[in-house]
Amino acid sequence: MTATGVSRLAAPAAAAQEAVQSAAAALREAGAEPVLFVAYAASTYDPDLLAAGFGLAAEGVPLIGCSTAGEIATAGADDGGVVVFALGGEGFAVAVSSQEVIAGDLRGAGSAVAGCVEQLARRESTVLLLLSDGLSGDQQEVVRGAYDRVGAEVPLVGGCAGDGLRMERTTQFFGSVALTNAIVAAAITSDGPIGVGVSHGWRSTGASMTVTKSSGVVVETLDDEPALNKYLDRLDAPDEVRVDAAAFTDFAATRPIGLIRRNRNEIRFVAKADFENRTFTCFAEVPQGGSVSIMEGDAESVLGATDAACSGALETFQGNSPKGFMVFDCIARKGVLGEGIQAEIGQISEGADGAPIAGFYSYGEFARTSGSSGFHNQTLVVLALG
Amino acid sequence: MPSASWSTVQLAEFLEVFEVLEMLDAENMTRIAVDRVAAAFDAEVVALVLDETVIRCLGFPADAVPVRLLRSASEVRSSILNAPGIGEVHSVSASVSTAGCTMVVLRAGSPFDREEETLVRSMARALGLAMTATDRLTESRVLAERLSERQYLSDRLSQIQKSISHRAPLQEVMDSITQGAAELLGADVVGLRIVGLGDDGRPIASLAGYPDEGLDHFRSIPLNQGFSGGAFVEGVLVSTGDYAAAARTLGTAPQELIEAAMAAPVHHDGRIVGVLNVASRDVGRVFTPAEQEILLRLADHASLAVTDAAAVHALRDSLEGERFKASHDALTALPNRTTVLEMIEYELHHADPAAPLCVLYIDVDRFKLLNDMYGHSFGDRVLIEVASRLRNAVREEDLVGRLAGDEFVVVAPGISAEAAGALAQRVTLEMTEPLVLDGRGTQVSVSVGVAESAAGLSSEELLGNADVAMYRAKTSGRDCVVSYDVQMRDEMFERADLEQEISLGLKAGEFVPLFQPSLNLATGEVHSLEALVRWNHPTRGQLSPDAFLALAEDTGLIVDIDLCVLDEACRRLAGWTQLHPDLTISVNLSVRHFAHPEIVEFVAEILAKYRLHGSRLWLEITESMVMANNEMTLEILRSLRSLGVRFMVDDFGTGYSSLVYLKRYPIDALKIDREFVDGLGNDLEDEAIVTAIIRLADALGHEVIAEGVETAAQQDWLIQSGCLYAQGFLFSKAISADATEVLLSQALTVENGLL
């Protein structure tokens, strides 16, 4: 059983309590005791007060969460409130953990936080939900760390916290504690099916370019030219974008690059420009020697991906309705959809077949169901719980 | 299916890891390699198995690594297994090093294809080489020496890698590989041959340590022969420390003084396409496993270069296709405007001042009419035929291009203006041959403008000059050649100014009608008024149509001028209804209106706006208009007729004067042209023509009006010959609306005086 609670109160502690309590009440009304709360809150709230509110309202039930670039609930997309997803009943069991990233060791942190899976007596299906700080470095390393720990058997899902596109500081919530530069996780096991759907709807445009020099997430040269110049020129970027950091972030939000992979492109969100060194930074590694394309998408292709993600999540449900949907939707998709964003939530609602929905607009998404890679950008990830 | 470029990218990315992270220890090196291999293949599991143990594994929790399963997977090249927690997986294994380490890759879902298997092997080998170097390093034997050796190896490989990624010519890359092998392995002779990639079908070959003269011979040796043939046939590295014995076994003639040799295969797209072989003359020399790894890695670089070159080849082919599309006209396959301009620009810069460049601008005469009459596909075929005839007419060094629509160009370098004129004549002559398409014969002619290059002229300007000359050829009756002179351009600028002025004048309401009455010769009463357009030009005063009509017709502005005159004439007529309830008005309409059915709506709207019955409006049309047009014209005339509007043929007798159209079209009146009226009373021929027109009109029940009546003698002649209506200076010139009102209020008759 799942339920959602929403608050738009301005006072952080009150908003946190209202959202948690209304989710818990809805769950109890349906006859289920909560076993996990997952909270998504606007970054405009004071994180410590918010966490205090969460801790009080959760009454000892595990709670993880993060700040967002916009919240998603059954009623639609919002920005500036709190959304809480409550999971409960006999059908589910949960273990949670948190880990701060120490000395930039994201892989180590990913591996440590994934340890909660080992505390669970696994039932029919298990998933590891990860919420991390996308501003802390290459998030593919988080996936690698978690994958090292749990292996191919447990799918990984989740997203990177947001801060309303300010790109300064994000928060991860663990009970009554607000963390930053951290990963929080919940291992969820269920008697029913659990599915993960992933889709992005971007397509490559123009000729591919060779990454002639990069170090980790920083792309230095493409085809032996300064990477920033190449990127801006390829896109015929307006003058403002070439000098203004904020304008660049806005512009790049809907113009990701794609790494050429087997049968697909791995999307990389272009996060910020270094105008002095003529480089740009992505949210995940762009390996030197590889090839990248500039990707394009429009409202239609992005909405098309919504259906694909929903049906992907329900693949193992054999026609049965899910008990709840959790969505991790890249903030850049919001940029492309604009007003069409409510249509996207409408499509997700349809896919959920009336089940509660909660999620947030993220700075990167986790979804590993096959292979070993599982960090995505500009992508929609849907977790269906049954 | 993954594409060839996919595997190139993956291998390049993988090789880069070791170049970038060369100082890594073995622990980190294997970890990163395993991550990268898993990412490249979307594989769930990648493991390194050494003897009985799994030294590195991704995809299983550390306490649940299925050692037995991975070991058995490492023993076969590929298989299908059941992996705990994952289910059915496809497995591929490849040797990492000669020391017995194997890489195992497991993937759920799709099986590995041949290209992927090859890539797994290449990656495993690259890892092996990096590990060997690292192991040696950690052993710390002659540390400094080794470090520089390793650095040297890394630098050399990186150089080759760079020349591949910078897309150096394949031969250059191959040369750097053989040079690299000679230096890294201390080999005396190194050879590399690749088949199936050279433009001339010959193998690409590179030799180091051997004179260049030997290349042709080297190239001619079949790849599957000799000691190195083993690598080509078997697809594995072959090595010997006793070359003479190996050669004897193979039954081939041993090369003198060679002691040790080894060879490694070069792959492309899952096939073996070449061999990299090295030989040493040092007595007792044996290539060590580490050296074998280096050769394999160099061969991998050759494979990478070949794959990349093939991809570039394919890309270039497709780009050339694209480039052709972008630079040529799709219909005729002739170079398009951009290409023509580039060509002219090029020629302008390279032209010999003594033999300048000439440009012929060619326009197909009456092409629009052909298109309208027979349809666009017919028109297209005409253009294709014209293109072909142009190609026949020009010299070999001339460029024929299509600019747009029915406009073609010939760029003729190194030719005098005189010779260009002759070339242009040849072009027009080539067109005279009748053209038969779909069993339909037609005649095509072209108007040609010729312009010659001059100092300081740009390609656009030169083409523009030819265009101006072509335009002159058009206006001088078509099917002819005109050479450009400077005056034409001035005229063109004047025309452009005038066009602009007309547009502005239309907006400012400067086009107004004057009215010239026609009289009933029997009663002397005003019969009808002809609205004649005048332009109240802000600086040049009132202009008659001679000053602007031709241009207005050319540019289509005549349509707006006509409508403006029609509107104002009807407005005035409505105002005069009280004075003269039966008064009619006639307005001239350009042929252009009859290409668009909207004219019917415009006329209907204007009549409704001024509450006029259609019968009070005459529209004057010309003979040529009725002749040139088609069903649509007839349809439009009929629709207008249904509004009550009547039609008068202007200047009757000057055109085709076909009796057929008089019958076919809804015509109510004929106007006898002033040219014939002039001769009345003194030219028997004119008199005969006018008599015939009057009789013809009479027979058809049409009214007949004589234009340009200037003398009483002409008037008398007309009355006597039965022409009822006349118009001319004898009665009144064209006068303003206000003057017309005065005239009407005075109930002007022939008797009570003229204006």
Image (cartoon, grey):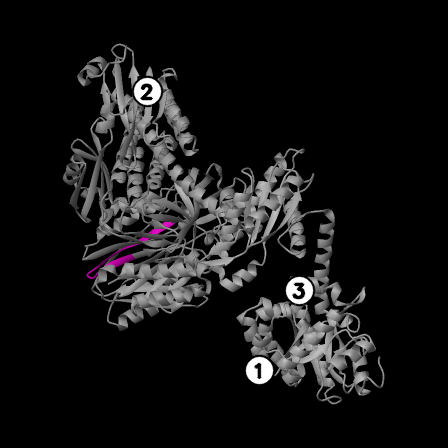
**Chief secondary structure of the magenta portion:** strand
Q: Quadrant of the C terminus of chain B?
A: bottom right
Helix, strand or loop for disc 3: helix
What x and y, as percent, mark residue B70?
17, 39
Q: Magenta span covers which residues? A: A181-196
Residue indicated by mark 2: B218
Asked whether residue A60 is drawn in magenta, I would say: no
Q: Nearer the viewer, residue A126 or B255?
A: B255
Query: Which one is in front in this view, the residue at disc 2 or the one at disc 1?
Result: 1
What x and y, as percent, mark residue B106?
22, 42
Residue type for callout 2: Phe
Distance (Cα) linking label 1 and label 3: 27 Å
Asked whether residue A195 is drawn in magenta, I would say: yes
Q: What's the chain of the residue with tag 2?
A: B
**Rendered view: A162 above or below B610:** above
> Badge 2: few (under 14), some or many (20 or more) residues near its Cα, within 10 Å?
some
Q: Residue at x 22, y 28 (%)?
A: B233
Q: Nearer the viewer, residue B725 or B299?
A: B725
What x and y, as percent, mark residue B262?
26, 20
Q: Earlier in the sequence, mark 2 or mark 3?
A: 2
Please give the label number shown on residue B553: 3
Residue type for callout 3: Glu
Q: Earlier in the sequence, mark 1 or mark 3?
A: 3
| Tag 2 and tag 3 share a subunit | yes
